[in-house]
Amino acid sequence: MAAETHPLESIAQVIAFTAQDEALKGFTVALSALDESGFIHIKNESLHILALPPEIWTRPNLLKKVSNPGPSTGTVVLMLTNKTSAMNNLNDVLATPGAIPQWMAEAPVQTATLPTTGAVWRSTINNILQLHKFFLKSDKIGDDLRSDSENIKSVMSISRELNGERDIPKLLNLILLKAREVCRADAGSIYTIESSVETNGITAHHKPGDEILHFRFTQNHSVKQNLSEFKLPINRNSIVGNAVLNRDTINIPDLYALDSDPEKNPFKIRHDRSWDERIAYQSRSMLTLPMFDISHQVIGVIQLINCKKNAAKRLLTPADFASEVCPFDAKSVSYVEIVAQQAGIALENARMTEEIQKLFDGLVDASVTAIEQRDPTTSGHSHRVSALTVELARVVDQTDTGKYGKVSFNEDEMREIRYASLLHDFGKLGVREAVLVKANKLYPEDLALIQERFNLVRASYEIDYLKTQLNIMQRPDMMALGMNPEQLQAERDQRNRMLDEFMTFIQRANQPTVLEQGGFDRLKDIANIHFHDINNEERSLLQDHEVKALSVSRGSLTAEEFAEIQSHVVHTYEFLRKIPWGKKLANVPQIAAKHHEKLDGSGYPTSAVAEQIPVQSRMMTISDIYDALSAADRPYKKSLPPEKSLEILEMEVKAGKIDADLFQLFVESKAYMVVHQGANKTGQKKAS
Ligand SMILES: [Fe+2]
Ligand SMILES: [Fe+2]
C-alpha cells in the first residue's frame, strides 16, 4: 500500500520505481544520456517506451538529436512534464513546425506530469502496455483488425491534440467531439465538477460531498439542440451523478428497454423521455464516464448517446433509431475510457494554465495600480492606453486593404499587445515621486523655504532699522549726519516693498507657463542680492538651484528632471525583460520599450527610426498621446475634446513622427471612442 502513494519527484526515483514494477518484468529500464538531459528507455523486444524528461521542453533543440529508436513493433513517446513552465513549453514546442523529428511526430504520444505518485505512474505505464497488447493482437489477427490499430493510434494521438488546447470551453468541445468520434456516438454532453464558488472575487470551497455538477454543453449530429448551461447536485437521482459517485463507467445498452420502475431495472434509474419527445429524438444507448485528474479525483463527466453502426448517418426517423443505433461495445468503451483519461489530464492542465493566467493578470493589475497610485495625475492611463491599443489592433487585424492589409494578430499576439500596453509606463516606479507629480517649477518645499528666507530677511531689515533708531536715540549727534527716523522708516519700507515685488515675481515665474520677457535677468538680479543670516554669514536671496528651476523657459521640469521622467521607458524595459514571458509573449518588453520612439528618430530612449519601431509600438504611441491629451481626470491639465486631440496627433503625423496609416485607421474606425463610452464598456474591455 505504501508503494501506491510513493512520491516520484526525480527521474532517478521514477527509474527505480519503474524497474521494480511487476508489470514490466522482461523489460529493461535504463537512462541514456544526451548532453545533460537523460531519456528513460523502457523496452523489450517489441515495445520501446521513450520517456522524455521535463527539462527537454526548456531546451527543445535537444529533441532534434534524439534518434529513432528503431523498427521495433511499437515505439511510444512518453512526454514527462512538470507542473510549472514545462507544460507550456511543451505545447509551444509541439506547435512549432519541424521542432520535433518526423518519427516522433508520427509515434503515439502519452503525457505524464511529474512529480507523481507510484499509483498514477503505474497506471500510465499499464495503459501503454494495454494499448500495445491491442497492437500486437491486431498484428497477429491480420488485416481485419488493422483498423483497430489505426483507431488505437488515433486515440493515442488525441492526447497531443487535447494537450494543445488551453481554452477550457474549446477543450471541452474537443473532448466531447473526440469521444464521440472514437465510438461513433450520435450525440453527447459534457459536465465539469465545481468544487468551489466565487462571490465578489472571493473563492470558497465546497465541503467534500457538496460539489456541484456543471452541465457545459451538448453536441448532436442529428438534431439541433440549444441547451444552456445549468448546475445540478451530485446524487443518485441522475445517471451522471451515479457515474461520479461510483467513479466508474455506466454503459446502458438501451434506455427505452429499461423498466420504468427504477427498482426493477439494474441501473436503478428512471428515464425521463420528455426531453427526447420535445426534440423528436430517442436516447437509446448511453455511455457515461467520469474524467479523472492526476490525483484520481473526478473532475468531469462525458455522456455519449446512441452508438451508430454508421458514423455518417443522421438519425431522423424512428426507423433510423431502430436500425442504426446499437449498444456501445466493449472495444468502444475501452477507446472512450482512454480518451476520458487523457481528457481529464488535459482538463486539469488547462485549469492550471487558467489559474496561472488569472494569477498573472492579477499581478499585472496590481502593478498598474502601484504605478497609478504614485501619480494620481495619470490615474486610469494604463488601462485606457491598453483599451485603445487593443481596439486599434483589432481594426488593423480586420483591415485587408492598405499598408496594413496583410497584418493580423492572433490571440497570443493580442495578449502580448495588451500586457505591453498595460505595463508601458511601469518604469515610472523608478522615477522619484516628487519629479513625477511636479506641477510647478519649484518643489513646494523649495518655495516654502524661499518664503521663510524672505521672512528672515524682512526680520533682519527690521532689526537693522530698530538698531539704528536706538543708536540715534543714544547718540543724537548722529542726526546731524543726516539720519533721521522718518528717513530710516522710509528706507525700511522701501526694502520691504522690494521683497514683496520679488516674491510676486517668483510666484509668477514658478508657474509652468513660458517665462516672461526679461525674466531670466531679473532672477539673476534677485540672486545677486545678499543678506546676513543670524550667524552673520552672507547669503543670497535665491540659491543657484532655485534660479535654475525658475529659469525653465517652458513647463515645470529642468533638463535633468525631464531626462529622469524619460528614463521610465528604460526602467520599463529592464523590469519587463526580467519576466519569463515564454515564446508566445516574448515581445512584450520590446513593444513597451518603444512607445516613445518617433518615426523620424526624434523619440527616446534610443532615437529609433521607422523600420526599427514595430507596428505594435506605433499603435501604442498613438494611444498614449491621445490619452495624454484627452484624459479627463488630470488635476493640473485641462483635457482636450476628441477632435482637438486628434488635430494635435495629426500635426505629429504631418511632421513625420507618427504612422499616418495607423492614425487614419484610428480616426476612421473611431477606435478612440473606446475610452469615451463609459466606465462599463472600458471595464468589459479590460476583462476580455
Ligand atoms: Fe510613457
Ligand atoms: Fe503612457
Image: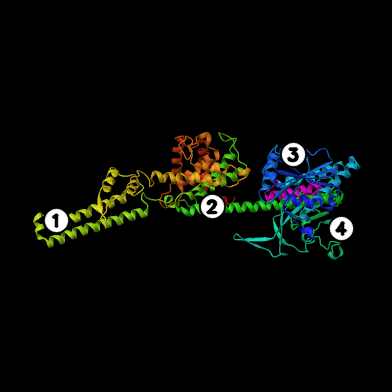
Q: Specify start and end residues of the magenta stretch as a single range.
A: 164-187
Label 1's element?
helix
- Identify which residue, 384 or 206, lies in the foreground: 206
In the image, residue 165 lies in the stretch drawn in magenta: yes
Kindly identify the amino acid type of the residue bearing the numbered disc 3. Val
Kindly identify the amino acid type of the residue bearing the numbered disc 1. Gln
- Identify which residue, 250 or 604, lies in the foreground: 604
Tell me if mark 1 has few (under 14), some (14-19) or many (20+) residues whose alpha carbon lies within 10 angstroms of its own: few
Kindly identify the amino acid type of the residue bearing the numbered disc 4. Ala
Q: Which residue is mark 4?
A: 257
Q: Position of residue 657 (x, y in %)?
A: 47, 36
Q: Tell me: 450 left or right of 144.
A: left
Say if disc 4 is inside 8 Å of ligand 2. Answer: no
Q: Tell me: 508 left or right of 649.
A: left
Q: Position of residue 68 (x, y in %)?
A: 78, 38
Kindly identify the amino acid type of the residue bearing the numbered disc 2. Ser
Label 4's element?
helix
Of labels 4 and 2, the one closer to you: 2
Query: Alpha carbon of mark 2 to alpha carbon of mark 3: how far?
Result: 43 Å
